[in-house]
Image: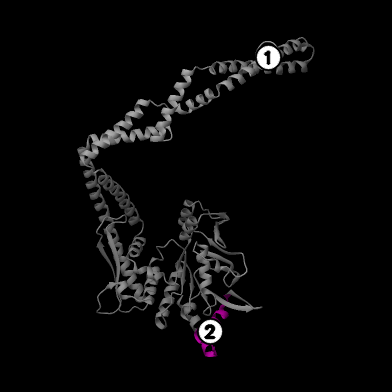
Amino acid sequence: MLQYLHVKNLALIDEIEVEFGRGLNILTGETGAGKSIILGSVNLALGGRYTKDILRQGTRYGLVELTFSVESERQIRRLKELDVYPEDGFVTLQRRLMEGRSVSKINGETVQMATLKAVSAILIDIHGQHEHQSLLYKKNHLAIVDAFAGEETKKQKEKVAETWQQYKGKIRELSEAGTNGSERAKELAFLKFEVDEIVRAELKEHEDEELEACYRRMCNGKKIAQSVAECYQYTGEDGESASEKLGRALRTLSEAVDDDEQLSQLYTQLADVDNLLNDFNHELAEYQKNCEFSDEEFYETEKRLNEINHLKTKYGNSYEEIMAYCKKQEERIGILENYDTYMQELEKSCEQLSQKYLELAGKLSALRQKKAKMLEKKIQKGLEDLNFEQVQFEIHFAEKKEYAKDGIDDVEFRISLNQGQPVKPLTEVASGGELSRIMLAIKAVMADKDEIETLIFDEIDVGISGRTAQKVSEKMALIGKEHQVICITHLAQIAAMADRHFLIEKKTEDAVTRTKIYPLNEENSVEELARILGGARITDTVVQSAREMKNLASQMK
């Protein structure tokens, strides 16, 4: 769950720290106090877009930090798949915002934005003021059904996706293979020319590297030969060479080694040096022989190297790439030489994959429809609990016109809000406020399926009041039993249900306006409920009503 929120230098926020708890966390405050800034800060920490004007005036940077406690084994496993490991049970997301750029960190390590968003999706789900509009898109309806349907459906969906990929690949191959006889003959002749050119070259692994080294040595042959000869003269030839002088030194020292043990040890070291020098001279003499080459050898080396480089420019940058290209072209030659058989097998493969896809997609559809009936009943009941008294909710299935990665099902949520009216798509029936309540009903149903522990609702109470507001508050409290819920609200009925209540205020001190957030105790919470209920004038009766509302909420929970 979200344990701590730390915000610095954003909009009207100088610096705030908030410690959230389990259950239902409620944030209230006057209009314009900065409630949207608080939620906006969370969004920024999760990778949301920002503009430089979000920074507090006169500051160089802004900072948002979220610290989550992670206890779920499934969440920990998914985090580890992203190379993110909780430290002492906590994961901290931090985003530092500067003009024109931002830096994101997880547990103190800088990460890419994609990683930040992937981790955020595991830890928290934000339902903003307009997210209920996503219910207007049918693709989201299928996603909700699949999320409810669970692991068996997920595994079947993976099988469908894999088969769809194979089918699409074969269809693409069949489409590309459809050339006429004249074009095939031209392609065949060209491929045979390429393969023949590679085969005749009789390439050997590492040959190019060896030739290049040899060619460099030949090009610098005179300089190399002169250097080697001069070196050998100093180290190995008779006369004044190092080897000759070292031999004399050894003979001189050998006459005295028996008289002193330390001198004997030095004699042994000098003998080792003499042996090393002799070995060196032997290898240098052999190398000197290799420095000798004829003009014909130079010509042949250069010619072979040019041939290999020519093949590299056409077929690949290395021996391995050239041979892989040759093998690929040989396979294509085999296809073109047996084209009719190849086409028959390709068409047969397409048909077999099509049948396999339909079979797997059919099983997936059956699983979905079975689970959708259960989901349909739960959402229907949830809507009734939210004061949709004459509601009728259906999950409608149709078959897609084309094969798709996620199966053949075209799923649509349909609803009737009045008795006697037929069910219709949500787009044709529900208003913004009604969509918000429908989304809340779905969230409540999905609560026990949802791995994400922290849910944030931003003003889900828009456009509702009275008995409906009471129903919404009860539903929020219900979700709060399974999840940590953070909710921004204007309604006293919802605020009364708070397990933790926070007040957001805007204050001006020394001509500077700042947004602050305060945790409220029981009595302060009653005073805030009274403010919401009574507006500008808070009487004893209003305070008493607020206290009674708080007590009733406690009894319901």
Q: Nearer the viewer, residue 391 or 513?
A: 513
Mark 1 sits on what residue?
243
The front one of 267 and 196 is 196
Segment colored magenta = 519-545
Say what amino acid the circle numbered 1 marks: Ser
Q: For the residue carrying disc 2, how many other residues have a C-alpha within 10 Å: few (<14), some (14-19), or many (20+)?
A: many
Give the x, y percent position of residue 550.
Answer: 50, 80
Magenta segment: does it hold 313? no
Spot occupied by residue 88 in the image (x, y as percentages of width and height)? 57, 56
User: At which x and y percent is residue 199?
Assistant: 34, 27
Q: Residue at x 53, y 61 (%)?
A: 69
Q: How is the image coloured?
A: one colour
| Residue 13 seen from this side | yes
Residue 463 sits in which quadrant? bottom left
* Amino acid type, callout 2: Arg
Q: Quadrant of residue 318?
A: top left
- Residue at 38% from the left image edge and 74% from the top image edge: 437
Q: Left or right: where does residue 313 sit relative to residue 329?
A: right
Q: Is residue 555 left or right of residue 505?
A: left
Q: How many marks?
A: 2
Quarter residue 130 falls in: bottom left
Taking the view exactly as shown, the residue that stands out farthest to the right is 259
For disc 1, the neighbor class at 10 Å (few under 14, some 14 to 19, many from 20) is many
> If you read the primary sequence from the N terminus, does the residue marked by circle 1 or circle 2 appear first?
1
Q: Is residue 285 left or right of residue 468?
A: right
Q: Are marks 1 and 2 in contact (CB under 8 Å)?
A: no
Magenta highlight: main SS: helix
**Residue at which label 2 appears:** 531
Q: Position of residue 282 (x, y in %)?
A: 60, 15
